[in-house]
Amino acid sequence: MNTILQRTSAPTVQPHGEPADRTTHGRHPDGSPPEVNVSEGERRVSIAAGMGLIGLGLLRRGLRGLFLGGLGVALVRRGFSGHCAVYDRLDIHRAGFSSAGVPDNEGVKVEQSITIRRSPAEIFAFLRDPTHFPQFMTHLESVENLDAQHSRWKLKTASGRSRVWETALINHHANELLAWESVPGAEVQSAGSIRLEPAPGNRGTEVTVSLQYNLPGGPLGVAFARLFGETPEQQMREDLRRLKQRLETGEIATTSSV
Amino acid sequence: MKAVTWQGRHRVEVRSVDVPEIINPRDIVVKVTATAICGSDLHLYDGFIPTMEQGDILGHEFMGRVVARGSAIENLEIGDRVVVPFNIACGKCFFCEQTLTSLCDNTNPNARMAEKAYGKSGSGLFGYSHMMGGYPGGQAEYVRVPFADVGPLKVPEELEDEQVLFLSDILPTGYMAAENARIDHGDTVAIWGCGPVGQFAIQCALMMGAQRVIAIDRIPFRLELAGRDERVTTLHSDKTDLPEALSELTAGRGPDSCIDAVGMEAHGTTLGALYDQAKTAAFLATDRPNVLRQAIMACRKGGILSIAGVYGALVDKIPFGAAFAKGLTFRMGQTHVHRYMPLLLEKIRQGEIDPRFIITHRAPLEQAPELYELFRTKEDDCLKVVLHPGD
């Protein structure tokens, strides 16, 4: 489940990809097969779980066995068809998820928080412009705005190669939430959100960053980094610390002139 | 320029290094006119503090003149004479706003290292290991001072360097030690350690209304200096049964507050001290908390323990049951130098304190290696060394 994207909270900016259109859901009037609204990974899980339940139902027999078996059949059908009636009713549409952001269950996901002694409005004003990110995210070489929603991000990798991809702002609530994801076909698949909440007792603002990304190096590259280098968690911790320094003191504490 | 560098356990060398430059807008560069060796520098010298690297520039007590300033500095001019606090504070974070400047959130670039050891990181410090920020120290001809709009205190020209130099660390540290002891009029205060911080803590405790101070050390010269005031009773720690003496001097009550101005490298001949030496020598423990143990046992019921001596990591065999049973209060920490500097500068101007009485040795920077060794061995009645770069 790609929770980062916060698609359920009323977005002021349309999510990237196809806009949700109610008329495309359910069985089409012309009798074509039901529309696919379940993602690939979830379909596989659905089939496996359904088979398991059918087996369990056969073993149990009786009324309970019948119920379990029935549920299993429904799940298997859901998996093979890719259509979920419950999702349909709830207006959830997850089939196209791999086209933008990060596919389900892939890549690295990190979430960390820090308290910054600034108002949500001050922090939001700074973070609304992604070109500020390289000031505290040392792995980013540069970010360039393409238009109000789109920006081009350039990453420095450990091997010295840089990777460039395009990102779209997909969610944006003044002084509360910002969310980005990479556009379809990006070399680096990524999705990230920043949530701002006033800290209790006038302590400033609690800033929570979620980040999910999938580098071309894949899971192997990440495993390697965990073993021999900076883990994604450490990296984010340091980035957030620098963000706090930048916003509280106007500069970033250092002993190095480079 | 010349700088005193750490080269390993019991090895410091004066080396030629690059002159520091402005990096951030809130930086200044100071040309050092006076700098001191601190008792806590001996913890580095003795190899007790982790994350030191060969070539690190030592020193956190220094003063001098501003020779360069960053674009955001408006309160200081080139040529201003300043004393610099040993801890670096941003002035903007939650802790700085309460003048708890040694707990500053934003000045340790290596906070992750301190977090591993302590859970959370305090402020960055000059010349005190990479865990504390890796900032080059002030035992050098020049030093870069970050966040200079918050830290450095301008001092009047009519006061000599040696009158104000100790505002950088040990005078505020002695003052905070006494303040943490929450002294009431009529109190008896026991102070372990008559080094520079202990000497200042004695003065400050008396200033705050202590009726009597019991000063404890093992070096006759230091006890003599402490005992110049008739309100001070001195005890030689190796020649006295301390628990007995402290109880007797207070007719069985115990001192109202106890100040530990020694810290993790306590010396001694008691069973506890020998145990600590053996354990630290075998790297089974990092600190030798003999003073802490004695203070906990000696303190009166409901009394206060003020800890000014530095502890680095783990301590062993602390009689915590005694502390609990007697309802003791512990107050401690690195000094919030910024909080006390203006107040103490005023006391120096008024002649209430003259900190020069602790200085025993003065030398050019080049002689630092011999003086570190002298200070360590406490030979020649060495109590405080002041180095003058450029002499």
Image (tube, coloured by chain):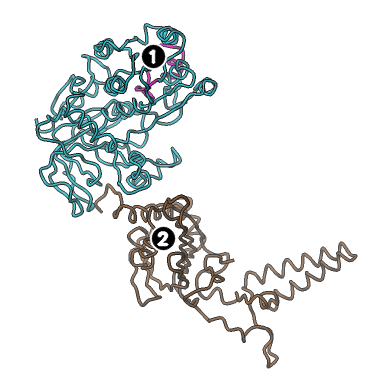
* Residue B273 lies within the magenta run: yes
Q: Chain of mark 1?
A: B
Q: Nearer the viewer, residue B310 or B161?
A: B161
Decide if residue B271 is on the left or right side of residue B143: right
Asked whether the viewer can see residue B59, the reply is no
Q: Quadrant of the N terminus of chain B?
A: top left
Residue B264 locus on image (x, y percent)? 39, 25
Q: Colour of chain A?
A: brown
- SS class, disc 2: helix
Q: Are marks 1 and 2 in contact (CB under 8 Å)?
A: no
**Picture disc at residue A120:** 2
What residue is disc 1 on? B268
Quarter residue A1 falls in: bottom right
> Which percent across, then down, holds residue B146?
24, 46
Q: Which mark is residue B185?
A: none
The amino acid beneath tag 2 is: Pro
Report the residue at 21% width, 28% height from top: B347
Q: Quadrant of residue B16?
A: top left
Please give the letter of the chain rendered in cyan.
B
* Pointer 2 chain: A
Q: At x 64% / y 74%, what residue is drawn?
A: A38
Q: Amino acid at mark 1?
A: Gly
Q: Position of residue B119 (x, y in %)?
A: 46, 41
Residue B342 or residue A135, whichever sits in front? B342
Q: Position of residue B139 (x, y in %)?
A: 20, 34
The part of the chain drawn in magenta is B258-278
Residue at 27% in and 34% down: B340
